[in-house]
Structures are given as C-alpha cells and as structure tokens.
Amino acid sequence: MCKCFAAAAAGLLLCAAFSAQADDSMTQFGRYLTAINKPTQAQTDLLSQTMQVRFPQTVQTIGDAMNYLLKFSGYSLIAEKNRSAELKNTLSKPLPTVDRDFGPMSLKDGLITLIGPAFSLAHDPLNRTINFDLKPQFKSDKKIWEKHKGVKV
C-alpha cells in the first residue's frame, strides 16, 4: 500500500508541476496531448504554405496552373486588364510536362518556378493578389528580340 501511495503522490506532483508550467498559450487535449495556441507559419504567411499537386489534364497552360495553385490559397492573379503583355504571353504558354507533378514546395516557390526566371513575384497582401514584374535584364532583351523579329537563325 505504501508503494501505491508513493506512486500516486509522485503522479500528482508531476501533474502539478506540468500545470504550473502551462499557460494560456497551450491547451491540453486529453491526457497526453497538448497544442500551442498560435497560428502556424503557413497561416500567417499564406505564400509559405507547402503544396504538392498533380495537375489534371484540364490544366493546359501556365496560367491555368497558376490559377489552380492559387484556387484555395487565399490569393488570386491580378486582373487580366492589369497584366503586362509579357506576363499575358507567358501565362498563355503550354504547361511543361516536367511541371505536371509539382512539389512539395512552398506556394511562393511554386509560383516562381512556373513563371520562370524572367519575372519576379510581387504580391499585394492587402488585396491578396499576385503579379509578376519583368526583371530589368529581360526588358533590354525584349528590345533586342523586337529588333530581330522574323530573322531566321
């Protein structure tokens, strides 16, 4: 009986010590599970959420893939009327086969991978919109390409 009493007393002391350490930032669920009462990184920074996707056959263009990724993220692409000609052109390109199975990676990395190296991601956290700006080094390349349009190599 003495051993039972000692074990029960030790258990009570352990529970008291644990509950003394617990504060309002933790919630206990059941006997062995506790949870921290704070949002996750992905909940506070929506572009950091991890995603992995296999695009369905209905997704044919880079723009389709972008919209598919953003569908449940809380973000959307900027309105088509506000997109640059270069962005519209890139979004209309076929989705590369290598990008059909995508991730795991953050949403931000996924968007940057899909759009390619010529653009940088710009997001508006207030309106939760995504835009892509053409990088300066590609603006000068654009002038070169326009100058040589129709020239066969």
Image (cartoon, helix red, strand yellow):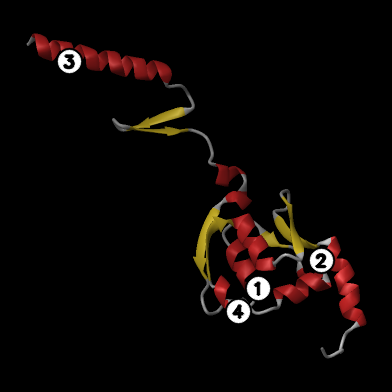
Dot 4, how many residues are within 10 Å of its Cα: few (below 14), some (14-19), or many (20+)? some
Is there CB contact under 8 Å for labels 1 and 3?
no
Amino acid type of the residue tagged 2 in the rendering: Asn
Q: In the rendered image, which residue does mark 2 sit on? A: 82
Mark 3: which amino acid? Ala
Dot 1 amino acid type:
Ile
- Secondary-structure class at tag 3: helix
Say few, some or many: other residues with alpha carbon within 10 Å of mark 3 (under 14 / 14 to 19 / 20 or more).
Answer: few
Q: Earlier in the sequence, mark 1 or mark 3?
A: 3
On the rendered image, what quadrant is the C terminus found in? bottom right
Cβ–Cβ under 8 Å for marks 1 and 4 = no
Q: Is residue 82 left or right of residue 53?
A: right
- Residue contact at pointers 2 and 4, CB within 8 angstroms: no
Q: Give percent across and percent down for residue 24.
A: 48, 24
Residue situated in front as seen by the camera: 61 or 117: 117
Q: Quadrant of residue 31?
A: top left
- For the residues labelled 1 and 2, the Cα–Cα distance comes to 18 Å
In three-dimensional space, the C-alpha distance between marks 2 and 4, rounded to whole angstroms, equals 22 Å
The outermost residue toward the front is 153
What residue is shown with label 4? 60
Residue at the disc numbered 1:
62
Residue furthest to the left: 1
Camera-side mark, 3 or 2: 3
Which mark's residue is nearer the viewer, 1 or 2? 1
| Disc ID at residue 7 | 3
Q: Position of residue 93 (x, y in %)?
A: 69, 78
State how far apart marks 3 and 2 are (Cα).
Answer: 70 Å
Tag 4 or tag 2, which sits nearer the N-term? Answer: 4
